[in-house]
Amino acid sequence: MEDLTLTEAVTDPLIRVMLEADGIDTSSFATSLENAKRRFIDQGIERLRQERAEHFYRWMDDRLQ
């Protein structure tokens, strides 16, 4: 099973019924999904930066000993 794209999620009939029942418009829902995606990507990038920095400093420590 694959994840839905943003367009698929916003146009999915079941999701639309749930959004309507909760009083959420599709534009707000789409914006929330985009914001969550951006935070997820940003966190992943930061995690990679930290891992690369740690790897570099371990490598330097090994070379200086």
Image (spheres, rainbow, N blue to C red):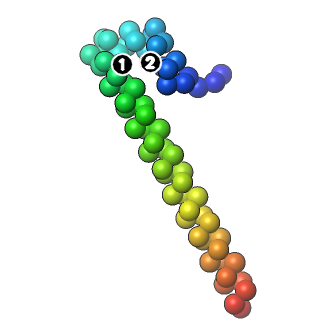
Q: Quadrant of residue 56?
A: bottom right
Whole-angstrom CA distance, mark 2 to mark 1, is 6 Å
Q: Amino acid at mark 2?
A: Val
Name the residue furthest left: 23
Residue occupying the point 54% across, 51% down: 44
Tell me which label, 2 or 1, sits earlier in the chain. 2
In-front residue for pair 26/65 = 26
What is the quadrant of the N terminus in the image? top right
* Mark 1, secondary structure of its residue: helix
Across and down, in percent, residue 32 comes to: 37, 32
Disc 2 vs disc 1: Cβ atoms closer than 8 Å? Answer: yes
Residue tagged by mark 1? 26
Across and down, in percent, residue 53 comes to: 59, 70
Q: Is residue 38 above or below residue 20?
A: below
Q: What crowding class fits label 2: few (fewer than 14 Cα within 10 Å), some (14-19), or many (20 or more)?
A: some
* Mark 2, secondary structure of its residue: helix
Residue tagged by mark 2? 10
Q: Amino acid at mark 1?
A: Thr
What is the quadrant of the C terminus in the image? bottom right
